[in-house]
Image: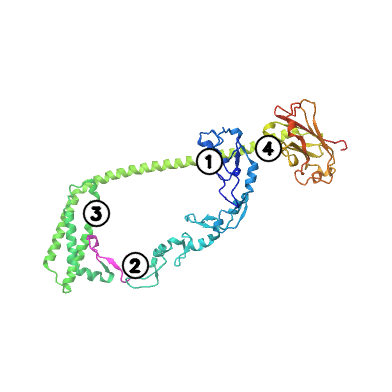
Amino acid sequence: MPGFSVKLKGEGTDPKYCCSSCGLLLNEPRQTSCGHRYCKSCLEELKRAIGGQFQTCMVPSCGKQIKAEDVFPDKAIEREINNIPVVCNNDDDGCKWEGPLKQLKFHRDECEYEKIGCIHSECKEKIPRRALSTHLAENCAFRSEICRWCKEPHPFKDIAKHQESCPMAPARCKWCGKKGLTRSQLQDHQHPQSGDCPNMKQPCHFEPVGCQEKLERKQHGHGEQQTITAHLNMVRDILRQLLGTNVVGLRDQDVEALENMRAVIPEIYKSIKELENEIHGATTSGRGVSKELENRVEQIRAKIEDVIKKLAASEPRVETIERVVAVLNREIEKCSSQMEAYERQRRQDREIIETLERKVRSLERIIALKDVALAEQDLRIQTLELTSYDGVLTWKIADFTRKRHDGITGKTASFYSTCFFTSGTGYKMCARIYLNGDGMGKGTHVSLFFVVMRGHYDGLLRWPFRQKVTFMLLDQNDREHVIDAFRPDPTSSSFQRPTSDMNIASGCPLFVPLSQLDSSSHAYVRDDTMYLRVIVDTSDLD
């Protein structure tokens, strides 16, 4: 990510703390050979933008070539930046926090004025952390609201719409006026077949021929007697449509219409029978029906019989079509069976593949654990090969230039030697070196320290540690070794019996000047390698 966008306490920041690319406070600062500084991400973005190679410094007055091997982390500047005093980014909203930059992130994770997202993923609002509870309780459109009728939770924004159709909402029958029903009970109450509403309106018996009238149950007989003429006219219109159809010339797509006509004819017969009964009933009750009406019924019956004859003539063609359809249905069923078999096989194959994948992952984990165990064994063997048991440590420091550069930049200020012992059951010790110095020797001397470590046989040894310790920097020309020695202070915690893995290091912060390492008259560093020797006096040990 680019530099820090923060609000500083007091005056503006020193330009040396700003990125030469984005202009913000440096984030993971990197220094180039020309002395300018960039954020780590800005430098990587610059590298990507120009095809994977650095070009020139972006500072207009510089223009020097940047090389990847000359770019290194600037830990000193990073520590200074982390201690720059800043105020909270939410100070305009009322936050009074102020402190070093390194604590800003932790503060913002709990700042009451920081704007955060609602816990409901559908809600896109950003609200201050302090107002989140109020937002969730009163303002969020997606907060949960309980329906007062069905007692089920729904999003607040949908509750009104839900209540318009809630099956448990109270309802009243508009036909009979019955109260105390829910919406779902009202549907059962008004069901056309199973409902118990006495005033329920049901379709007319002549609905199949086009009558849209709906009557109450008790009105069905009386109402249909009053509309006999209208019902006969509807029957007449249907028959005209039927007689106008070229039944003999039916095509494949007319088979469905033919089946519909077959279904309509019994309904028409039923309607005619009901009409005849109503006509006789009306005559008996004193309502005269004209002779012309009876003649029309006879004409309708004759026309229906004519339609039936035409349908009978088209039956062979319909049967042929039905046989073809049956063959096609069998083929479709056969294809469906094959597809189901293929699908079952595919699922089985998929399960086998997944099982094998799980086995491979398991074997990979086992191999990884074995690799770790082998690496630990190799490290243990190497340590044993380098371990001495006579109180003398000869320490080879290879790759000296890189390690010294790491010490200068702060990447690795110090490192430890392998452990060594005064005897097989004696004191366990190691050395610690700062190639760029530590404390009063930082930047001017190599600092070398002696460390007492916790061993397996500490309970058998004499404490505090009292043995004389001698440090030697070996001249590889075998002329003039650098030698320093000291006797432990019995009162120092560094030489008491260890209670942790190792005690605090103690030794020589001014062991050898850095300038002396580069002396042409000595070979303290040759082939990028330095040799040190630590000698512990064991003469008074049993």
Res 88 quadrant in image = bottom right
Mark 2 highlights which residue? 190
Tag 3 and tag 1, C-beta contact below 8 Å: no
Q: Which residue is mark 4?
A: 408
For badge 4, the amino acid type reads Ile
Closer to the camera: disc 3 or disc 2?
2
- Report which quarter residue 279 is drawn in: bottom left
Of residues 211 and 458, which is closer to you in this image?
458
Between 448 and 96, the one nearer to me in the picture:
96
| Residue at the spot of label 3 | 260
Quadrant for residue 21, please give it: top right
**Marks 4/2: CA distance?**
91 Å
Label 3 or label 2, whichever comes before in sequence order: 2
Report crowding for label 3: few under 14, some 14 to 19, many 20 or more residues within 10 A (C-alpha).
Answer: few
The answer to whether 184 is drawn above or below residue 3 in the figure is below
Q: What distance separates the C-alpha of mark 3 from that of mark 2?
A: 30 Å
Segment tinted magenta in the rendering: 188-213
Q: CA distance from mark 1 to mark 4?
A: 54 Å
Q: Which mark is in front, 1 or 4? A: 4
Residue 355 circle label: 1
Q: Amino acid at mark 1?
A: Thr
Measured along the vertical axis of the image, is residue 62 above or below residue 503?
Answer: above
Q: Look at the image and tell me whether residue 385 can be seen.
A: no
Q: Amino acid at mark 3?
A: Asn
Q: Circle 1: is it few (<14), some (14-19), or many (20+) Cα within 10 Å?
A: few
Identify the residue at horizontal 19%, vertical 67% (top origin).
227
- Which mark sits nearer the N-terminus, 3 or 1? 3
